[in-house]
Amino acid sequence: MTHPLALVTDPHLLDEVLRLAAAADCPLSCVPDVPALRLAWHAAPLVVLDAAALPSCTAADLPRRPGVVVVHGGDPPWPLVVAVGACALLELPAESDTLVALLTDVRDGPPSTQGRVISVIGGRGGAGASVLATAIARESAAAGTETLLVDCDPLGGGLDLTLGAESTAGARWPSIHCTAGRVPMSSLRTALPTPSDGSGGGKAAARPRKAAPLSVLSCDRTASPPEPQAVTAVLDAARRSGCTVVCDLPRHPTPAATAALSRTDLTVLLVPAELRATAAATRVATHLRTTGTPAHLVVRGPSPSGLTPTAIASAIGLPLLTHMRP
């Protein structure tokens, strides 16, 4: 059984639970009594009970199981909640977001692996951070991992242009609004542009391995910044579904960039092998330290003045991840 199971006898609570299940895009199987509940008690991924159903559930001596949620409208019967082994007790509608989150997790299903987030920041303007972020995302998708490329730089012109997907239909940041709760990854997959070959074209698409989908959430040409709550919700949704997320972040601290950094597993600071770029990147690295963000350095050479990647890393004070040509 893949759908959550519900025994909710209070008609007002039942209407609320059904409304929240629809909001989570999660089908819900409702049963009329405890005998029907017992038939699917172990198979359901989540069981929702209301306080009025608890006496009959405890009297039937149903075995303990994880994933039992009790909803109520106020003044819950605590001894019965404990007796049924509930993992969550939610007052509706005050705690509706929590129930939506639980139903959304069931709807998306358990990921085979936990997703990871990589953020790329340029040490100076024109360092090539957007190109590197796009290249990482294309390589990830070409290697068979579902990937989401996220543009957090409203002044960058739009990563859809970098991918060659500016004419591809789909949502951009101005149409993504998430003030609270969770976003189903299934909704993002449907809404966002996905280049037809899964990698944005080019050599990566011609490789013999099977490419995974690559979606892009880009800023548009209006310079409207992403909302930090929306960035958090999108990254959390992708991480829960097992996606690799690659974020292109601006050098200057913005609320959206700070939200992305708080969810990032690996932060990459890209620095051209130049004296002025090293000085500029030192300021960016100092800001990252103040936010508690551990970062690694990627040096893009060759250096016109003979600066070595090791010397640049020493001057900036960050560990050197790798060095590369343009």
Image (spheres, rainbow, N blue to C red):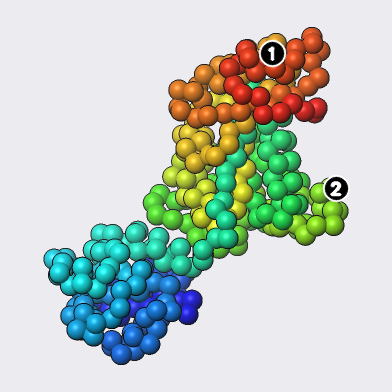
Residue at 28% x, 86% y is 34
Viewer-closest of 233 and 303? 303
Say what secondary structure mark 1 lies in: helix
Q: Give the quarter of the image for residue 75.
A: bottom left
The residue that mark 2 highlights is: 203
The residue that mark 1 highlights is: 311
Farthest bottom residue? 35
Q: Is residue 247 left or right of residue 309?
A: left
Q: Looking at the image, is 218 positioned above or below residue 38?
A: above
Which amino acid does the dot numbered 1 rest on? Ala
Q: CA distance from mark 2 to mark 1?
A: 34 Å
Residue at 24% x, 82% y is 61
Which amino acid does the dot numbered 2 rest on? Lys
Tags 2 and 1 touching, CB below 8 Å? no
Tell me the crowding category of disc 2: few under 14, some 14 to 19, or many 20 or more residues within 10 angstroms, Cα based. Answer: few
- Screen quadrant of the C terminus: top right
Q: Is residue 143 left or right of residue 191?
A: right
Residue at 34% x, 89% y is 36
Q: Which of disc 1 and disc 2 is earlier in sequence?
A: 2
Residue 323 percent across, percent down from the top left? 74, 26
Residue at 55% x, 60% y is 111
Viewer-closest of 210 and 182? 210
Q: Give the quarter of the image for residue 24.
A: bottom left
Q: Is residue 276 left or right of residue 175?
A: right
Q: Is residue 287 left or right of residue 120?
A: left
Q: Give the quarter of the image for residue 3.
A: bottom left
